[in-house]
Amino acid sequence: MNVWHNVLEKFSEGQRYYRNLYLIKDEVYGKDLDHVELEISIFEPVDVTVDDTYEIYFNLINSDPTFYGIVYAKENDFMQRHAKLKEELQKIVDSNKTVKNDGKYKLEGEFINSFVKKHEVKMPMDMFFDFDIEEMAKALSKLYDDVDDFF
């Protein structure tokens, strides 16, 4: 039987910081920590003068297709949005109707589209590419300068 596990303590204090965000809640759902089906986390803004948006990250780990994203929320509603996401995603995991023979949760495009629209799920670029474009340009410029030294 699947249960929720609080895994926040698995992250060091330093690992909980990400840009202007701080990880305040991280839970996984599964039989145990070796058989996790779902993860959901909350990041709060460190400096609200820079940005006052909370981020709720979710990952339905064994889904087909892969299904994860971020829901942005403000202080007055992030806990309610988190609870609703957690409840709906848990239902997917617990529903026998969605499990395929290979153990993955089959998600139909119609369901994904309605879920994304309902919860305003986003997939920002920094989920894939976590870098500062200006720093990358400087590094590439230096790399090209170093390449010239070889010729």
Image: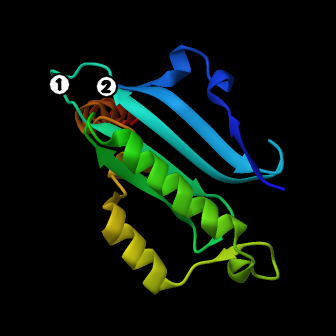
Q: Is residue 19 left or right of residue 36?
A: left
Image coordinates for residue 38, horizontal then vertical, percent: 64, 54
Whether tag 2 and tag 1 are in contact, CB under 8 A, the answer is yes
Residue plotted at (36% across, 29% down): 44
Q: Is residue 140 left or right of residue 91?
A: left
Name the residue beneath numbered marker 2: 20
Residue plotted at (37% across, 57% down): 123
Q: Earlier in the sequence, mark 2 or mark 1?
A: 2
Image coordinates for residue 136, horizontal then vertical, percent: 31, 36
Corner quadrant of residue 9: top right
> Label 1 crowding class (10 Å Cα cut-off): few <14, some 14-19, many 20+?
few
* Amino acid type of the residue that numbered disc 1 sits on in the rendered structure: Val
Extreme residue toward the left, this view: 49
* Amino acid type of the residue that numbered disc 2 sits on in the rendered structure: Asn
> Label 2 crowding class (10 Å Cα cut-off): few <14, some 14-19, many 20+?
some
Q: Which is nearer the eye, 131 or 150?
A: 131
How is the model colour-coded? rainbow
Q: Which is nearer the eye, 127 or 148?
A: 127
Q: Residue 50 has which mark?
A: 1
Q: Which is nearer the eye, 148 or 141?
A: 141
Residue plotted at (61% across, 17% down): 12
Check disc 2 and report its element: helix, strand or loop: loop
Please identify the quadrant where the C terminus is shown.
top left
Image coordinates for residue 104, horizontal then vertical, percent: 73, 72
Asked if 5 appears above or below 129 in the picture, the reply is above
Whether residue 129 is visible: no
Residue plotted at (31% across, 29% down): 142
Image coordinates for residue 26, horizontal then vertical, percent: 57, 35
Asked if 41 appears above or below 101 in the picture, the reply is above
Whether residue 26 is visible: yes
